[in-house]
Image (tube, rainbow, N blue to C red):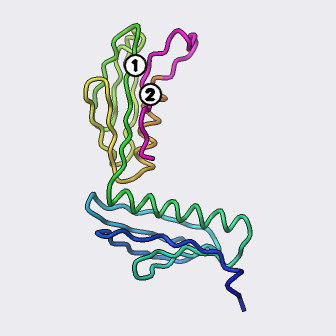
Amino acid sequence: MLTSTEVYEVAVKIPEGVTVSIEGDSLKGYCVKASGPVGQNEKLLKFKGVFIEKLDDKIRVYAKSRKKTYKAMVGTFAGHIENLLKGVKEGFEYRLKVFYAHFPIKVRVEGKEIVIENFLGEKSPRRAKIVGRAKVEIKGQEIILKGVDIDECGLTAANIERATRIRDKDPRVFQDGIYIVKKPW
């Protein structure tokens, strides 16, 4: 028989206006689905021995062990669920800024890609992939990424920043590029 000291748990409060459903089990993984005013999203969370259940206005994430590994996974699952709930309630926003000193950089959205032209005077444009449902808005020298999934927004921002990485030049002199200036936290 397990005592309460052997169970490690974290409770995540469900905000108003958000509906949550949980399907699955500990072996196959839990599919946590949430929908709110901004949109809907889902996340598959799987780790043997970590359990998720929905109570009235909370989601309980727990493990029947207090070992370091299980505590870490319970915290990770709770963090993923909090991001899922925040995303469907408020959404996430990344802001990037275009910096150049030598050649004016032109940025445009083309389908599911961002095209970066005239970077350091290069003739061929550089491209960055837009991941998932992230929305990209370009206003002058500022790029705004919005979405309900923090992973998709973060990966898109990283793709854009990585596309303008400078190689084989002195980074103290050539500081041109597109850089993340505001993250959602």
- The verdict on residue 167 being magenta is yes
Q: Which residues are magenta?
A: 165-185
Q: Which residue is mark 1?
A: 99
Q: Name the one closer to the observer, 164 or 63.
A: 63
Q: Report the residue that reaches farthest toward the bottom.
A: 1
* Distance between the alpha carbons at the discs numbered 1 and 2: 8 Å
Amino acid type at circle 1 is Phe
Give the SS element for disc 1: strand
- Residue 32 in the image: x percent, y percent? 44, 69
**Residue drawn at (55%, 73%) of the image:** 61
Q: Which mark is residue 179?
A: 2
Is 83 located above or below residue 130 in the figure? below
Specify few, some or many for label 2: CA neighbours under 10 Å numbering under 14, 14-19, or 20 or more. many
Of 185 and 131, the residue lying toward us: 185
At horizontal 36% and vertical 44% (from top left) the residue drawn is 93
Q: Are marks 1 and 2 in contact (CB under 8 Å)?
A: yes
Q: Is residue 75 left or right of residue 176?
A: right
